[in-house]
Amino acid sequence: MLELMKNVLRLSLRHCGKVFLLVLLVSGTVVLYAKPAWLLHAKSLTRPVLEWAGISQAVGSDTGAVYWCPMHPQIKRKNANDVCPICNMALVPLEGGSTESPEQLTLTTRQIQQAGVAYAPVVRKSLYREIDTTGRIAHDERRYAGISSWIRGQSRIDKLHVNFTGEQIDKGDLMAEIYSPELMTAQDEYLIALKSVLNVQQNDETRRFSPDIGRDSLLASARKKLLYQGMTPEQITHLAEMREVLDRIPVYAPASGTVIEKHVQEGQYVNEGDWLFHLADLTQLWIFADIFEEELPLVEVGQLVRITVRSFPNEQFDGKVSFIDPVVDKTTRTVPVRIEVENPQRRLKPGMFARIRFQKKMGKQLAVPASAVMWSGKRQVVIVKQGSGMFQPRQVRVDPMWAYSVGLGYSPGNLPRFGSEWERYHVVFSGLSPGEQVVTAGAFLLSAESQFQSVLTKMLPPEQESATLAEAVGQPVANRIRKVLDHYYSLSRSLAEDQLDEISERAEQLQQAAQSLAQQATADEMEELARQAGQLAELSSSLTGQGPQNLHEARVGFGRVSRDLIALLANHGGQTLLGSEVFLFRCGMAKVGYENWLWWSPEKYNPYMGQKMLECGSQLEILKP
């Protein structure tokens, strides 16, 4: 009551017309003061009058309470009697917070429940990195055999015992029979040589064939000829013993496998070296997968992988990395990785596409669930729980790749289950400490509310909107553009200081820098930039040698240089420098044909007017020709 009286007396001098009514009001309040029930009634009567008097804010005391509009959460006030300026609803108390901290978000218990907010602690977990990619199935080249015709000259496929592609063959199976007149002639020659050797022998017992007889030079030559024609030593021995010429040479399978290709038909003539069949053992296959170069640390020889194919969507096959290509593909920036997979039932077929998933143990890492991280351009933001109803958006740095938590029972001989069955995590590099609670569900709703309260805007640093000059044109070209600017600034300073005798030297330095830029742009295949840099060098050369005769002539030449340099920057990434490193000015008083110039700071240093009007001109906002 005393506080009320003081406020009334203090304001009575400013509100003379209202003093009388206020005195009556206070007097009535004093009378009712003895009864607490009447006091509440008196307060309700005095509030409208005080507001009418314009002193409601002065009379009320600041209790620290915050009131908000449930329909429009961005509306928050400290006065309990305020109403929402949007919907005219009475404000209600806000639990657990104040509007004084711009870096925190305050919500009621009801809001948290409606948003479905859930939390998770930041802890160290045993994680696994996973690569999920596709591959193509092929036959094992070590289990692949080609059968060609080895008979000299032309021969005929007299009989085929393998009639279709895909037939399963065992090692030693008869595949074809070949008729060759030349081979028959070679057999006759061998028998003649053999008969000649046997006739020389006097003992009847030695007239039978034996391996020692082959030591004769003529007989040995005939035998070699048969071997070259494709007969086996067993067939030659049979020929010598039976003295019967083989009219058809059998072709046997050199290995077990599946006929992948059949190149001949029965009755077809073939020449020496022509392919007859190709066999592949499909009980073990290769799978080739392409791994991005940044993922190579996650792959190693001997690593176990999990394979699935669309033909058997509910089944998984186990494979093992057997080879990593030593060369990166220049076009795709990937590395081929070869995987071996057992295929005893031949269910996997060469040519199929397969889904391959690699997994590598990372050890214990500080991590947060993937659902806790919000991506805003290049920034990564999480919402940290601070207390009852209090949240803080915080910029963090995490590994953008997912990691997975794998259950117990993992061992090198027992492949782990993969990502879809486990929660995804991001490894935390900075911004969070173990034990802190982060929002894992409802984070986007909280983010929307934080935008109402301007929390993110006030807390997070502004994001860079444009690329740097080096990102736009490459570091070598960017370095040379900066050198051109440096020498251009020196030339501009000499003009601003009316130093005519320095113009030629400064222009020559600018010319050399522009020529260096043109050479680098040509090497980087930036033809338009090379052309503009060459033109800039040519314009700069007009100010070299004897140089201009007077300052006006020098400033005319400088205006042309400025025009071309500004166009070069505008067309080739230099606009990224405007406002931070390069500033564009214009002088309407200059009478040189072009009034714009560049400078390295916001300070005006007019090269067109010199010492006469050094600070004349205005700064332009947009860098354009």
Image (tube, rainbow, N blue to C red):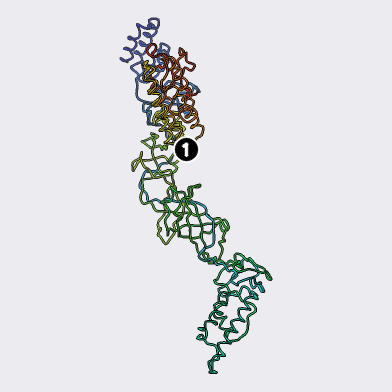
Residue depicted at 61% across the width and 64% down the height = 261
- x, y percent for residue 410: 41, 58
- x, y percent for residue 389: 39, 34
- x, y percent for residue 488: 41, 24
Q: Residues within 10 Å of mark 1 (few under 14, many from 20)?
A: some
Which of the 4 image quadrants contains residue 446?
top left
Whether residue 604 is visible to the viewer of this picture, yes or no, is no
Instruction: Reply above or below: 134 against 578.
Output: below
Determine which residue is flagged by label 1: 524
Which of the 4 image quadrants contains residue 440?
top left
Instruction: Reply above or below: 436 against 300.
Output: above
Q: Nearer the viewer, residue 50 or 26?
A: 50
Q: Nearer the viewer, residue 557 or 252?
A: 557
Q: Residue furthest top?
A: 17
Identified by mark 1, the residue type is Asp
Q: Name the side, left or right, on which 505 lies relative to 225.
A: left
Q: Nearer the viewer, residue 398 or 255?
A: 255
Whether residue 252 is visible to the viewer of this picture, yes or no, is yes
Tally of numbered tags: 1
- x, y percent for residue 29: 36, 13
Q: Residue furthest right?
A: 267
Q: Quadrant of the N terminus?
A: top left
Label 1 element class: loop
Which of the 4 image quadrants contains residue 311?
bottom right
